[in-house]
Image (cartoon, grey):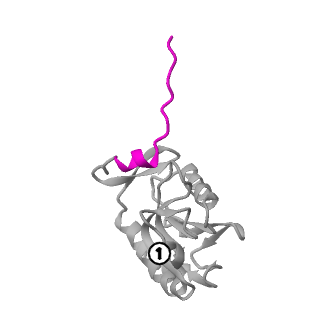
Amino acid sequence: MGAQSIPKPLTVEEYERIPDPPGGRYELHHGEAVFVTHPLHSHRELQRRLRKLLEPLAEAAGFVVDTEFPYRPFPENEVWGADVACVGVARYDAIEKWLVGSPEMVIEVKSASNTKAEMHDKAMTTLAGEGAVEFWIVDLATKTVTVHSTLRGMRVYGEDSAVPVPLFDGSVDLSQLFAGL
């Protein structure tokens, strides 16, 4: 029996040469190209609502809110995408291709295909990246938001709650976020 070779992780430069496939795009997770489908309408609607709720708070505090935001939590073998990201203006203005490090706040809208392990990996990888303070998981099925915070630990908020946003000294009213969905 011959020796088996272990494939080496893709570098960012190798990843950049891979064309996006029909129906989605690739992200680079720990050196592996991971296919991410285009979001469904309900997913996009939650992204739109989050942006609308966060922008007034963020802009007043010197942050930019963006959707489908690419970032590199670690310098090599990683290019991730945030459904919604909040980044300080100075860091945002310094971006050449992708944000180096993690956004200060990343929000993921959970899809039916997301596993608990995937969400945990993304939260921990993001929070380990330079700059990260909070990682939110928005779950339409349960109408909850799980917040992983370097400042406050982990907490789950229900649809009748307001999620505090220490970066902006404000909060997001979840009844507005989930209304009618």
Horizontal placement of 112 versus 169: left or right?
Answer: left
What secondary structure do most residues of the magenta stretch adopt?
Answer: loop
Residue 42 spot, x, y in % from top left: 39, 68
Q: Give the tally of numbered discs.
A: 1
| Mark 1: amino acid | Asp
Would residue 88 be seen by someone viewing this image from the given angle?
Answer: no
- Up the image or down, 168 lies above or below 83; here it is below
The front one of 19 and 180 is 19
Q: Which residues are magenta?
A: 1-17
Residue 181 spot, x, y in % from top left: 43, 74
Q: Secondary structure at mark 1?
A: helix
The front one of 32 and 48 is 32
Horizontal placement of 123 versus 25: left or right?
Answer: right
- Up the image or down, 174 lies above or below 24; here it is below
- Up the image or down, 178 lies above or below 9; here it is below
Q: Which residue is mark 1?
A: 93
Residue at 52% in and 49% down: 76
* Location of residue 96 by image quarter: bottom left
Q: Is residue 111 magenta?
A: no
Residue at 61% in and 66% down: 132
